[in-house]
Image (tube, rainbow, N blue to C red):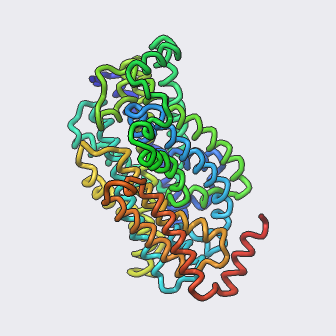
Amino acid sequence: MSLNNIGVIAVFFLYLLFMMSVGVIFYRRTANMSDYFLGDRKLNKWVTALSAQASDMSGWLLLGLPGYAYLEGLSAAWIALGLAVGTYLNWRSVARRLRTYTQAAGNSITLSDYFENRFRDKSKILRIVSAVFILIFFLIYTASGFVAGGKLFSTVFEFSYTAALILGVVVVVSYTFLGGFNAVCWTDLFQGTLMFFAIAVVPIVALFSLGGASVTYTELKAIDPHFFDLFASARAEGLFAGAVAIVSSLAWGLGYFGQPHILARFMAIRSPEEIKNARQIAMIWVAVSLAAAVAVGMVGRACVAPALEGADSEKVFMVMVNELFPPVLAGVLLAAILAAIMSTADSQLLVTTSAITEDIYKAFIRKNASQNELVWLSRLTVIAVAIIAGLVALNPESSVLDLVAYAWAGFGAAFGPAILMSLFWKRMTRQGALAGIIVGGVTVLVWKQLEGGLFELYEIAPGFLFSVIAIVLCSVLSKEPTQEIVNEFDAVNEPE
């Protein structure tokens, strides 16, 4: 496939120039750590909603999920359903309370800050453990974005995968380095809009090109009689294996409660009262985007010839855009993939950087470091983390969906139960939080290495369950929280 023409390249060049410009603008407005990591809690509802969802979906929305639907058919909708429900519950149950609690608990600007302040952990062990798991899983997560970027640039510019990967890393690092959280969120507003437009338009145009929904349906049934069967895996592999597959897909929704880059948006909105409107905007975006992503993969099965196999199935969106649209419009639609990649990779870099700067350097190495020093250290750390993630992403056969699934499970199991129960359970203790984070994170790391039978279950499910159990047991068995902690919990929750 050749997309090496002046129209596509011009669109990409203008898009990248715009991203860099935003970084330069916010470079001049970044004076301290709160600015760099939370935008000084001044995001409006539109920026919060679209930034949260754009940073959530990443390149897998236009590559991984369509590729999975291309191979598996309608059964891919189980993942979409789990994610939609998880998104709603996260906005409905966590967003407002986390925004209020993080400000009340010492104006916390990172999850590690929040855990330490919420439980008055003077030992700083909660901060260290949180930072370690953030580093482990965000390196994997950021690598998934760089893999997607490498595939995109190698297709558009006909570079080698390695050269394309380096180009993608340089672009993402540049504006994150300069502008920090504000640059990331305001570019996400634009990128989220572009992603929404692209993922919605492509399957509609493809359906018309094939002769309509009825003709497409008939053609897909001829290719695979079970393509529209939601329970195809259960019928093909047996009841137990099918149930494991469906539960695994739905379990993606559990991941939302523990994703630091999404939770940071809740913490940064300028007013808790704007959460409701932001949730409505976010849910419309998510419902349409997830349904359209599954549709891209399914319609692409009839639209794309010759058939794509294995990891190449993740190129179905790119192939369809190349075949169905004129060069300039194709450039705009392909830029949506870049938007998806950048909107998540930049957020991941920022959270990883905050873990190193705030939770390690400031906490243990230079407690009296100036704000200017910390901001510049954060910028340099962005570069270092990006280089390591780029090295992890060097294998061109890596699957974007597989890498995302691993990191998503890690965060969901390590931090999800701890966040939920710290917001809703007054009796939770520091020991419970520590046990939950460790048990959830380690379960994911170990479960991922096991194979066969029950171990085919997506690792987030057992990780989340075991983390909840660990939190409850250790909290009940340890000393009750101090009156100061109880009073703060009551004050935060009183309005609701």
Residue situated in front as seen by the camera: 277 or 444: 444
The structure residue drawn at horizontal position 58% and vertical position 44%, both measured from the top left corner, is 84
The structure residue drawn at horizontal position 73% and vertical position 69%, both measured from the top left corner, is 493
The structure residue drawn at horizontal position 50% and vertical position 63%, both measured from the top left corner, is 464
Q: Position of residue 344 (x, y in %)?
A: 45, 49
Report which quarter residue 484 is drawn in. bottom right
Report which quarter residue 164 is drawn in. top left
Q: Where is residue 305 in the image (x, y as percent from the top left)?
A: 31, 19
Report which quarter residue 319 is drawn in. top left
Q: Can residue 129 be seen in this view?
A: yes
Residue situated in front as seen by the camera: 108 or 324: 324
Q: In this view, does 122 lie to the left or right of 357?
A: right
* Badge count: 0
> Which quadrant would the N terminus be assigned to in this image?
top left
* Most distant residue in the right direction: 495
Q: Is residue 20 visible?
A: no
> Which quadrant would the C terminus be assigned to in this image?
bottom right
Asked if 201 appears above or below 382 in the picture, the reply is above
Q: Position of residue 346 (x, y in %)?
A: 43, 51
Asked if 426 appears above or below 410 in the picture, the reply is below
The structure residue drawn at horizontal position 51% and vertical position 44%, both measured from the top left corner, is 54
Q: Position of residue 292 (x, y in %)?
A: 52, 31
